[in-house]
Amino acid sequence: MTAGFLFASAFIASAVEMVEALTIVLASGITRGWRSSLAGLGAATVALAAIVGALGPTLTLIPLSALRLLVGALLLAFGLQWLRKAILRASGYKPLHDEAAIFARELAEAKTAAHEERAGLDWYGFTLSFKGVLLEGLEVAFIVITFGSSGKNVGLAAGAAGAALVLVATVGVLVRAPLARVPENTMKFAVGAMLTTFGIFWATEGAGGSWPGEDAALPVVLAFVVALSFTSVALLRRRRLSLATA
Amino acid sequence: MKKIAAFGRFWWNFVVGDDWRAALGVVLGIGITAAIAAAHVAAWWFLPLAVAVVLALSLRRETGAQGRS
């Protein structure tokens, strides 16, 4: 059961970040040339692999309870950020994340940027693609390493991220356009709920607590977090409407 | 020096985000859970409750600030 949750969380979280990275790579490729954009993508992938390669084995040396405490705290801090944004978007307090609008903005900025050639590459295109992939990829790496090491299954988490990469890259190559139809806010909501759930579960265990029913408590915690989120959205929507009509 | 500051800022934004009080609430919640567990009392119920309070306060701060602006 935990393995299923772990795979689903790592897959959805990775897919969301990869959709954002794809938008930046496409904007860079279309305006500044595919060579520089793909070189940036490749360099960022190598940098990410080095980070995961260095951190992954180090984390497995930490005792499991200390690791779960650290990872639980990080996931909770991280998950609450995602959940908070998703709740504010769903209740209308923040605008929805719009990949098409972001793509248009990136295109306009990339078109007007000055041309500077370094090592035979358009430097703006290279750095735009490199930074976008590295920053979005770091979140994927963080999720894969923390989920994988705490769940004692780095391979499964990495496999989920790999499956998400194959899916997003295939669709990206086929459509060559930002994946605006991906229900990104719904996915972010799901990821925020899962990160928060794992954070609560592992931090409690790491702090010395134990769950009634052990792993069977995980879906109950998830149901609690989802109910909490939906209640928050409903209350905030009602509040916003009452303020608008007042 | 600027690069070190930028590196620190990146990690702060990455982990803590735009509401440091929520991150502090998480740390306090985990600390209290550890204290309850150390007293050999069931501690599993505390963190979900703490998360509900931290999230509610964080949302209230954000929407309250928007309502006033």
Image (tube, grey):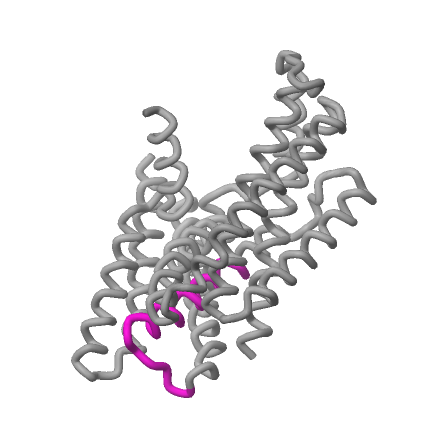
Residue A37 vertical placement versus B19 (above, below): above
In the shown orientation, is residue A11 left or right of residue B20? right
Give how far across and how far down residue A168 sits, in percent. 71, 50
Residue extending furthest right? A174
In the shown orientation, is residue A82 left or right of residue A18? left
Residue drawn at point x = 67 percent, y = 19 percent: A119
Report if residue A91 is visible in the image: no
Residue extending furthest bottom? A213
The image quadrant of residue A48 is top right
Residue drawn at point x = 50 percent, y = 63 percent: A147
Give how far across and how far down residue A163 sits, in percent. 69, 59
Give how far across and how far down residue A4 sits, in percent. 60, 73
Residue drawn at point x = 42 percent, y = 49 percent: A240
In the shown orientation, is residue A121 left or right of residue A242? right
Q: How many marks?
A: 0
In the shown orientation, is residue A31 left or right of residue B26? right
Split into 4 quadrants, where in the image is the N terminus of chain A?
A: bottom right
Residue A79 vertical placement versus A130 (above, below): below
The image quadrant of residue A126 is top right
Magenta: main secondary structure equals helix
Split into 4 quadrants, where in the image is the C terminus of chain A?
A: top left
Residue drawn at point x = 47 percent, y = 68 percent: A226
In magenta, the rendered stretch is A190-213
Q: Is residue A210 magenta?
A: yes
Give how far across and how far down residue B60 sits, in percent. 32, 51
Q: Is residue A63 magenta?
A: no
Report if residue A5 is visible in the image: yes
Residue B45 vertical placement versus B4 (above, below): below
